[in-house]
Image: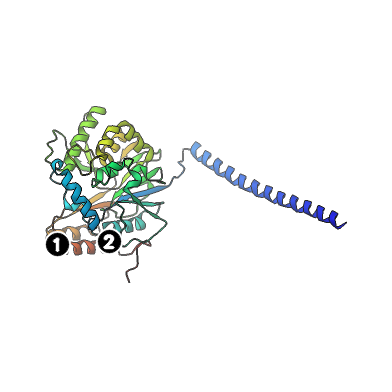
Amino acid sequence: MLRIMFFHGRQYMTKLIFYLLSVLLFVWSSLVCDEQIRHANMAHEGVAVEEPVDIVYTWVDGADPRWQVIRRYWQTEYMHYLTNSDSISSCRYKNRDELKYSLRSVYQFAPFVRHIYIITFNQVPAWLQSDPRITIVDHSVIFRNTEDLPTFNSQAIECNLHRIPGLSERFIYLNDDVFFGSEVTVDDFFTKDGGIIVTLSKHLAARGKNTGLESTYESAWKNATALLNSNFKKERRFRMAHAPFAFTKTLFKEVENYFFYIFDLVISHKFRLPSDFPVINGVIQYYAFYTKRAEFGQAAAGQVRITDDVVKNEEALKAFEGTPWKFFCVQDVTESDDPVIDVQVKEFFEFLYPNPAPWERRTD
């Protein structure tokens, strides 16, 4: 009798567990189905389902002794090719903690951002502590050909942004000297139909014969102007503003396939050369515009230049404070190591962004 009762008890418990699992499965299926129906209805009604947006930075610690030794070696190897006036300018690698304050601007003014990726030469900012919202990505992770490394060419690094593991389809790229100055939304960077919004400069892009003696930026734009003229139409174009750049990985890969020889060329250059192209701040944007996947936006973008003249710096920084730019660039064109300039820049950043972000190490 006890064995019979035990047998029926086991049957009852099995049925009860099966019943509970069935109920849970039914509830889960209903939730999934409801979510699928919601997305389908939104698509039918012309409402875009919100996709995540990540931010990508490129950064280097130019004061790192190990990096300096490696750079000097390759600079000697490349010296014959470095004809442009700014190919090896020290201001390209100077670090005044711009990244720290740019990240503060993201935390303060871009709450929609899902994740932040920082591409580096196996370096980590001293003030950055481990945080699930930020991932450090070494160059070796995104470069397909290890022979192209090490590289000191930002344009080469930028050609590989779309290869970051885990990067969202939609992403925004910032140089570390670009900042958000007021509240921004996804609509400042992406159109409702999946396109990108491009912020143009007021300055016309360079054109004409590439002499190899102008700045690398001018040389690159002369090359891009000829490239776009031959593949699309001949016209005068404006340069990109010093602002955040919006991309989709799909668009990025498409342009890479279309201009594969341009990508391969630029990626192979360890320093900026006269034959480079402004891939991520010109070529991709105009390709997207000509294929009807980009709009030219109207957002205000500002710029302040930091020079070796401390008096003019003070005037420029004071005039800039409080200006309601959505985004702006602090362009460092200094050649000297005057510590007064460091103080000027730090005070300016602390005035604009006094509150540390949660990923910063405590200093007290």
Label of residue 352 in the image: 2
Q: Earlier in the sequence, mark 1 or mark 2?
A: 1
Mark 2 secondary-structure assignment: helix
324 vs 306, left or right, is right
Look at mark 1 in the image and give the residue it sits on: 338
Label 2 environment density (alpha carbons within 10 Å; few <14, some 14–19, many ≥20): some
State how far apart marks 1 and 2 are (Cα). 22 Å
Which residue occupies the extreme bottom position in the image? 364
In the image, which is nearer the foreground, mark 1 or mark 2? 1
Q: Residue 165's spot in the image, x, y percent?
A: 40, 46
Q: Residue 146's spot in the image, x, y percent?
A: 31, 43
Residue located 19% across and 36% down the image: 275
Label of residue 307 in the image: none
- The answer to whether residue 87 is seen in the rendering is no
Quarter occupied by the C terminus? bottom left
Mark 1 is on which residue type? Asp
Quarter occupied by the N terminus? bottom right
Along the line of sight, which residue is nearer the eye, 309 or 162? Answer: 162
- The answer to whether residue 66 is seen in the rendering is yes
Q: Residue 226's spot in the image, x, y percent?
A: 20, 31
Q: Residue 145's spot in the image, x, y percent?
A: 31, 40
80 vs 8, left or right, is left
Residue located 17% across and 47% down the image: 75
Along the line of sight, which residue is nearer the eye, 187 or 8? Answer: 8
Tell me if label 1 and label 2 are in contact, CB under 8 Å: no
Is residue 356 shown above or below 135? below
Label 1 environment density (alpha carbons within 10 Å; few <14, some 14–19, many ≥20): few
Residue located 78% across and 51% down the image: 11
Mark 1 secondary-structure assignment: loop
Is residue 221 shown above or below 103? above
Mark 2 is on which residue type? Leu
Rendered image coloring scheme: rainbow
